[in-house]
Amino acid sequence: MSDTLTNLPPDPILERRQQIHERAAQTIGRRTLVSKMYVFALLAAFILALVPLGSVIIALVQKGVASISWPFLHTLPTQPSLISQNAIGGIGNAIEGTVIIDGFAGLIAIPIAVLVGLYLAESSSRVANFLRAITEIMTGLPSILLGVFAYEYVVVPMKSFSGLAGIVALAVLMVPVIAKASEIAFRGVPTTLKEAGLALGARNSRVTRGIIIPAAMPGVITGVLLSLARAMGETAPILLVIGASSGWTWNPMHSMSALPLLTYNYSGSQYPSQRAAAWGVALTLVIMVMVLSLGSRYVSARMRRERH
Amino acid sequence: MKKTLRGRFVVALATVGLLSTMAVTVAGASATLSGDLTFSSSDGASSMAPAMGGSSFDEPFFNAAIPTYMSFASGVSGGNAPSGMPLYSPVGSTGGKKGVIAGTYAVGASDVPMGTTVNGTSLDSSLLTNADPAHTLNSYVQIPVALGGVGMMYNLPSLQKFSKYPVILNSAVLASIYDGAITKWNDSAICKLNPKIYNFHYKWVTVKKNGKKVRIHRLVSKSCAMPNIPVVPVYRADGSGTTFIFMDYLNQTAGASFKTPGGTEVFPGTTFNQGQVPSNSLGGQKNAGVAADVQQTTGAIGYVEYSYILLQHTLPAARVVNAKGEAAVLSPKSVSADAAAFAAVPPKEGSNGVVSNFSIVNGANSGDYPIAGYSWAIVRQDWNGLGSFGGVTASANSERLVAKFLDWAVQGGSKGGQTVAQQQGYVALPAYVTALAEQQIGTMTYNGVSLGLS
Amino acid sequence: MAERIRLSATSDRPYALLLRGAAFFFGAVIVVFVWSVVKTAWPALHQYTYHLVTGKSWISGTGPYGALALLTDTVLTTLIALAIAVPVGLSSALALLFLIPERIKSFAASLVELLAAVPSVVYGLWGLVYLAPWLSHTVQPFLAGITGGRWPFNGAQEGFSVLLAGMVLSVMIQPTIVAISRDVIAVVPTDLIEGGLSLGATRSQVFTRVVLPTAKTGIFGAIALGAGRALGETIAVAMVIGSNPQLPHSLFTTGATLASTIATEFGNATGNAGSALAALALMLMVITASVNAFARVLTKRARGAGV
């Protein structure tokens, strides 16, 4: 019996397993080394990805803080000249213009966008699918195209550069972004909730008002704030249409000033004082954009917490 | 209660949208603006903020002249005194002409008069054909407002020790730089023009002099000190009258030898373009962008209005060889000498509205700097029926206010606009050019009636 | 009962109309938007036909208008941006998902999102003031040095170049690539990853042979989305590329993209020149819309398939 056992032909599976074990043992050192290097490379790449952010922030703080002061923030710009090269004044009207243009664009875009979002969330007809695809593509279109659009349809007929043209361009820019975000938020509302409402005999509109919108609110608000933040930083569309102003223009039918445009203009100025101030303008803009971006996170987090 | 609030949400959103649209419209309807820079006119018909823009050659002038005028005006009693004007937008000469034709500017400015024809084609054919067909060149008044020189600003830090001797260039070299024939700063053509920018090598040698042995420091060799680095020509990427003045100079002096790298003769225009400039050149936005590009790039050279050079304390302007063969330094004096060379043939407007004799490059006077030009303000001759345009509502009153500003701007003397121009590095307009300007402003009418400027 | 439901459904018409109305209004705006670009571009399309795309020379103001150089520069800057952003972005996404300690994960993720919140004009300013001198003093001499100044690292070292534009773009599209690829990698089934690990594969082997191949479609979608953004970026590119429309001879040459040309020339373009710029806008619209549509199909397929 024992004789037959020992004389058995070698088990191919066992042998293969043995080989694999040996091979694994031989290569384990190399493989772990490669893996460690790989992991190290990934982490290094991640750090590398953050280097530009760090550099931008350091640059903004280093160069921007110096030019920001209370008068800088609330006074009007003045034009430096050869004899008074440092008289650049403030950026009060640019802040005001940015807020007005962005705010009105938001006021026009939000209701339309939320309704479009609702429509996209509730309908799956062919038309809705098509509109959904178009909306998604719109979110990726270069913003300069909207500048061309606003120029042809607002500036040319009005025969004047105006804040209104900027408002129109930014509103069209914002609608797809908000619509997309709110569609996702509306779709995220559990069907059971909707059905419960409908089962109680409520109409669709009632269910929307009473159930869907409140439930989707955090998502909608996040989308709104993010799109406001994005629109606030846009330079390309307003570059073509809002003109230039050195006064407090409260009327959007006139030329206005805006922070991103001022940053662009100052960065190429012949006056060193304005080139230095470009960083102050940029820092102000970044702070305003960050307040909106971070605000959106805070609001949505807070509303979610309150619900649960 | 809570439910009703929620219930109204959609309605609220919709109304907010509607209201905001209405608010924009209503805001537009109300003409009085608090705090905005406006004219306020005696009859209360309009309050206006006439938009001006165009040539960046003129930017330092207009931006200094507007506040000065406003402070003068505030001392003037009477309701017609303007209370404010918006800043000048330096969008480039072509942009200025486009703006005044499209009506986005009440006043446009260009360094090359509208309707100028070069080599058989009008520079503005596409501008005017696109405008209202009822308006020809004669619908506009063109007013010379500034006279200035165009400097060749360069960035060669290695020439620090030769700072007493700004680089000398002539039109052939400039043409070769801009058509790519000269690619290095130590090109023999540049070295030849700059005998002072050489390194001299001496050696102590012993020589016999009157039978005595003396050691003297003898020049054994000299070498061109121009750096062996590439020339980076900087040009204007946007439509520019400064470019026109520069190309006009090259075309008139270097003539047919000013060619594209491809070999076609280059005629003056408002843009340099691909194929006309070497591949390593940089395109700058406006005068300011060219100045900034030159400042940031070692080996760069660019053409900018004089005040832009005065601003860059660090960078010199090249001396340019004039028609008399002198190496001329750019200064108000040398530009003035250049303009004076053309006193016998002053610029004038023909019956078809075309301005002739405006070019003043390469004057034949001694001591003149050859690259210079006038800049022109362009306004509609008769504002009747224009409605609201360029930040104003057209009326005899608003037209008169704009005409008054321009009339002031072209005046010399201690209180005139040209004094402001001189402070900014321009040259005061010669008397015969001011006279032309006043005559032009005098042709402005409202509904066929003269504005009656006193 | 049935009667009642139908009743309430009919009386709900205003609601349905409101939604449809908004959707219709927005659709109409899009149509007008596209139409405005096509209409303005029409004279140039009519006059120059295909030469608008294949013509080598772009002479602003007078014509001829050929956008070949602009198209080439647009594609080239995007490729440079992808060459930098894809490896870095994918690595960051993997690091964020699998390597960063749980405690700081959300903080690290929000740092990457912060990159997306910085306005493009600020990146332009940063590129103009910081990167351009660094490039001309350090990077370009170094690249030319190690290659002996051979193509594509030949030419003047001015800082402003398609290379600089590509580098600035790479920073700007980074967050898009990280965010989307992180999403699609996150849905790679845990079974697959654990299966790989249980077979004795190291982490690097799991990443390269399991995770990335499985998430391939979605990652291509992320790359396409990033490319879409790079193709259309305007202001930052206009500030650093040197505004010189020419076919690139090397990575160091100055150039101009479709979008940057519209931004820099639109202010003084009239008549035909304006129409030619609108034609550029139309090309840009067609290109970015196709790239985006392609990207959406890929990412959707990736998410739909559960991987």
Image (spheres, rainbow, N blue to C red):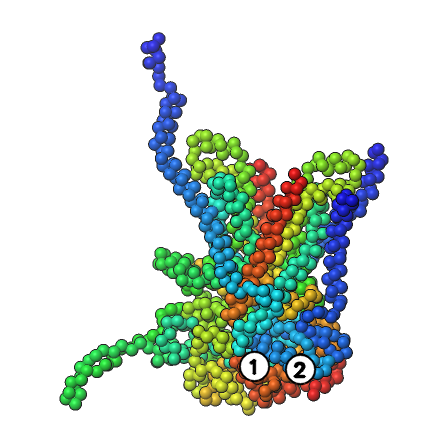
Which quadrant holds the C terminus of chain A? top right
Q: Position of residue B213 (x, y in %)?
A: 15, 85
Q: Quadrant of residue B162?
A: bottom left
> Which label is found at residue A282?
none
Secondary structure at numbered mark 2: loop
Seen from the viewer's position, the closer of residues B290 and B313 is: B313
Residue pointed to by mark 2:
B75
Q: Residues within 10 Å of mark 1 (few under 14, many from 20)?
A: many
Name the residue at 52% across, 67% down.
A275
Mark 1 element type: helix
- Residue most toward the front? A70
Where residue C298 appears, as percent x and y from the top left, is: 57, 43
Check the residue under mark 2 and report the chain it is in. Answer: B
Q: Which residue is mark 1?
A: B421
Discs 2 and 1 share one subunit: yes
Q: Position of residue B208 (x, y in %)?
A: 16, 86
At label 2, the amino acid type is: Gly
Is the residue marked by circle 2 packed among few (<14), some (14-19), or many (20+) residues within 10 Å?
few
Viewer-closest of A6 and B71: B71
Please say if C170 is above or below A93.
Answer: above
Q: Residue at x 81, y 40 (%)?
A: C9
Q: Residue extending furthest left? A: B211
Which residue of the protein is positioned furthest toward the bottom in this rendering?
A: B344
- Is residue A259 visible in the rendered image? The answer is yes
- Vertical relation: A157 (above or below) C8: below
